Image: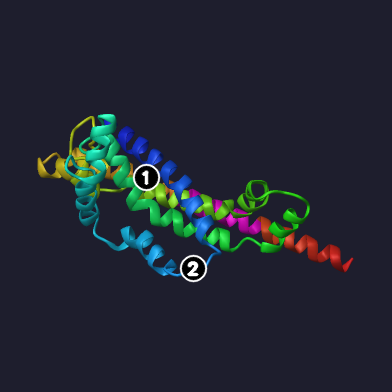
Amino acid sequence: MITPIVLSIKVALLAVSIDAVLGTLLARALARRSFPGKNLVESCIMLPMVLPPTVLGYGLLILLGKRGLLGRLLQEMFGLQIVFTWWAAIVAAAVVSFPLMYQSAKAAFCSVDVSLEQAARTLGSGEGRVFLRVTLPLAYPGLLAGLVLAFARALGEFGATLMIAGNIPGKTQTIPLAIYFAVETGDNQLARNLVLAITVMAFGALFWLNSWSKKKLQTLQQGGDVRVKSSHS
């Protein structure tokens, strides 16, 4: 029982790490820019959110399989095979959860006051420094929300993982896969324990996010009240 839990946490954390980097950079690049085809690009980014996971899994299998474009390239150049390894589970989880990270990051960057960034530029800060010192700290509540939601989604990924990583105990068998095959083999006790474990982890992540968001909002409101009182005094 412990092995699928540990593997699921590792897969979810690594998938979210990929989403955090790519989602943040992509959201930053697209948040305030308009160009022909932007709607098409964003529709493609959000597509994994609405497509059935088995469809995504099949697409990844075609792409990363031995005869796939990327899979054949990796095999010939580096001798790497991703399909039916735990890296395939990471790829599946990252793809499925990516839209949640991107959408939260985009909303966070759009909410940042542009005048603050401009003020930093007029003081001589370069774009990299503005992003790290101004934009990122102001956007981090939204980025954190995206990370938690993406983690919860990656933790529960099933269909795409089964298609591209398979169900190999101790290697690619995450909690959702272990639950499914435990039910198939009649091991209801194991299934119940794993259901409880993943429910507690997902609920805990969402409960913490809601509690943190509430405290953050209260802090901002208190800060606003203090500023208002100071201006009247």
| Residue 35 numbered tag | 2
Left or right, residue 146 beside residue 92:
right
Q: What secondary structure characterizes most of the magenta part?
A: helix
Left or right, residue 2 beside residue 38:
left
The residue lying toward the viewer, choosing from 53 and 114, is: 114
Q: Earlier in the sequence, mark 2 or mark 1?
A: 2
The answer to whether any part of residue 198 appears in the image is yes
Q: Residues within 10 Å of mark 2 (few under 14, many from 20)?
A: few
At 67% from the left edge and 63% from the top edge, which residue is drawn?
Answer: 114
Residue 215 is situated, as x and y percent measured from the top left of the image, at 61, 54
For the residue marked with disc 1, what is the amino acid? Answer: Val
Q: Quadrant of residue 214?
A: bottom right
For the residue marked with disc 2, what is the amino acid? Answer: Phe
The residue lying toward the viewer, choosing from 143 and 87, is: 87
- What segment carries the magenta color? 206-218
Distance of mark 2 from mark 1, alpha carbons? 43 Å
